[in-house]
Image: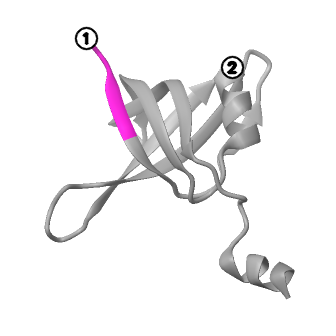
Amino acid sequence: MNKSLFIGRVVKNPDFKMTENTDIAKFTLAVDRHSKDKTADFVNITAFSNLADICEKYLKKGQLVYVEAYVKTGSYEKDNKKIYTTDFIASDVRILIWNSGKDKGEEQNEKK
């Protein structure tokens, strides 16, 4: 079985592009480790097609999200060197905590 589950915060708004074949959204999750030193792993996620459209429309920096993905490995040649890749391809994305997408400074200015 090839399945990965993540709960983390969106690091920045997704990068979105449309190609002839499909839409693509790429974003990074900060996933906390359960350790004393409070470290996080930064996981790059790629979503395609309708899921990419949803990610581009609704995901914002700082939101807590759940992502189901599968691992896709590959390789390519660059400067006569073989480069190996590991990608996490999203099959499900769920927003656990919605936020307004505004930083605290903007919210405070609106309250005045």
Q: Is residue 80 above or below residue 1?
A: below
Q: Is residue 45 magenta?
A: no
Give percent across and percent down for residue 106: 78, 78
**Residue depicted at x 71% and y 60%:** 101
The answer to whether mark 1 and mark 2 are in CB contact below 8 A is no
**Residue depicted at x 42% and y 31%:** 88
Q: Is residue 56 left or right of residue 80?
A: right
Tell me which amino acid carries mark 2.
Ser
Does any portion of residue 80 appear in the rendered image? no
Crowding at dot 2, Cα within 10 Å, few <14 / some 14-19 / many 20+, comes out as some
**Residue depicted at x 61% and y 58%:** 61
Does any portion of residue 107 appear in the rendered image? yes
Q: Helix, strand, or loop for circle 2?
A: helix
Crowding at dot 1, Cα within 10 Å, few <14 / some 14-19 / many 20+, comes out as few
Residue, disc 2? 49
**Where, quadrant-wise, is the N terminus in this rendering?**
top left
Give percent across and percent down for residue 8: 42, 49
Q: Helix, strand, or loop for circle 1?
A: loop
* The residue stretch that appears in magenta: 1-6
Q: Quarter-wise, where is residue 24 in the image? A: top right
Q: Residue furthest front?
A: 111
Q: Is residue 2 magenta?
A: yes
Give percent across and percent down for residue 90: 50, 26
**Residue depicted at x 71% and y 20%:** 50
Give the alpha-carbon distance from disc 1 to disc 2, as whole Å.
23 Å
Tell me which amino acid carries mark 1.
Met
Residue, disc 1? 1
Q: Residue furthest top?
A: 1
Camera-side residue of 46 and 51: 51
- Mark 1 or mark 2: name the one nearer the start of the chain: 1
**Where, quadrant-wise, is the C terminus in this rendering?**
bottom right
